[in-house]
Image (cartoon, rainbow, N blue to C red):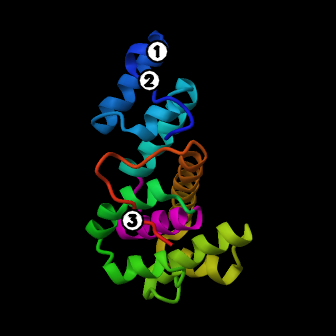
Amino acid sequence: MARVPFATRDNMDAAGQAVWDEIETSRGGVQRNYAAILNNPEAASNFAHLGGYVRFQTPLDPRVKAVAVLTAAREASGHYVWTVNQSAARNAGLSDADIAAIHEYRSPNGLSGNDAVVSGFVIELLRQHRVSDATFEALRGIIGDAGIVDLLVVVSYYHGLAHTLQALSVELPDGTADALTY
């Protein structure tokens, strides 16, 4: 059970309802992850703006983004983020074997080519809190300087979201099986 109540549009003031409406319109509904975060509508609004960019506007290749999202979610043990992003990862071309490599902490070794570079970059950043010159240059060669900044924003958003939802004990959507098992 979530540690905070799930906000509803009806229990918010006009400013909160405006944030609710914006999130609902941009995402086709308010899922429980944002219903929990909407306990602070201003924070939710800002978080949703960043999330909107990384979900819908970033020019990163969908496969690059999917590898980064899953690696960030796995590194945070983020059950919600890991689970709800499985479909997008498969749609971006990741195989079950690729996903398993990230899940089982075998990446970047269990991945090939660009996927290994992306996952290695994210792992270095999140485990060591820095990235080696060799890893940085390898990723730069794939996605360029603007792409690196975008990837860092994607990782920051999803890693932060994973931690937020874990701290708030937000359950997966009804009928969704947890895909992040140990």
Measured from the top left, where is residue 127 in percent x and y?
69, 71
Measured from the top left, where is residue 45 in percent x and y?
50, 30
Q: Are marks 2 and 1 in contact (CB under 8 Å)?
A: yes
Q: Which residue is rendered at x = 71% and y = 78% of the image? A: 132
Q: Which is more N-terminal, label 2 or label 3?
A: 2
Establish if 173 lies above or below 114. Answer: above
Query: Which callout, 3 or 2, points to the residue nearer the camera?
Result: 3
Q: Which is more N-terminal, label 1 or label 2?
A: 1
Numbered tag placed on residue 19 in the rendering: 2
Q: Amino acid at mark 2?
A: Val
Q: CA distance from mark 2 to mark 1?
A: 10 Å
Q: Which residue is rendered at x = 39% and y = 19% of the image? A: 9
Q: Which residue is mark 3?
A: 179
- Magenta stretch, main secondary structure class: helix
Quarter of the figure with residue 177: bottom left
Q: Which residue is rendered at x = 39% and y = 65% of the image? A: 179
Measured from the top left, where is residue 84 in percent x and y?
37, 56
Measured from the top left, where is residue 91 in percent x and y?
26, 66
In this rendering, would 30 be left or right of 164? left
Q: Amino acid at mark 1?
A: Met
- The local secondary structure at tag 1 comes to loop
Closer to the camera in the image, 164 or 146: 164
Give the magenta-colored segment's residue range. Answer: 58-76
How packed mark 2 is, by other alpha carbons closer than 10 Å (few <14, some 14-19, many 20 or more), is many
Numbered tag placed on residue 12 in the rendering: 1
How packed mark 3 is, by other alpha carbons closer than 10 Å (few <14, some 14-19, many 20 or more), is some
- The local secondary structure at tag 3 comes to loop
Q: CA distance from mark 3 to mark 2?
A: 30 Å
Establish if 111 lies above or below 171. Answer: below
Establish if 46 lies above or below 78. Answer: above
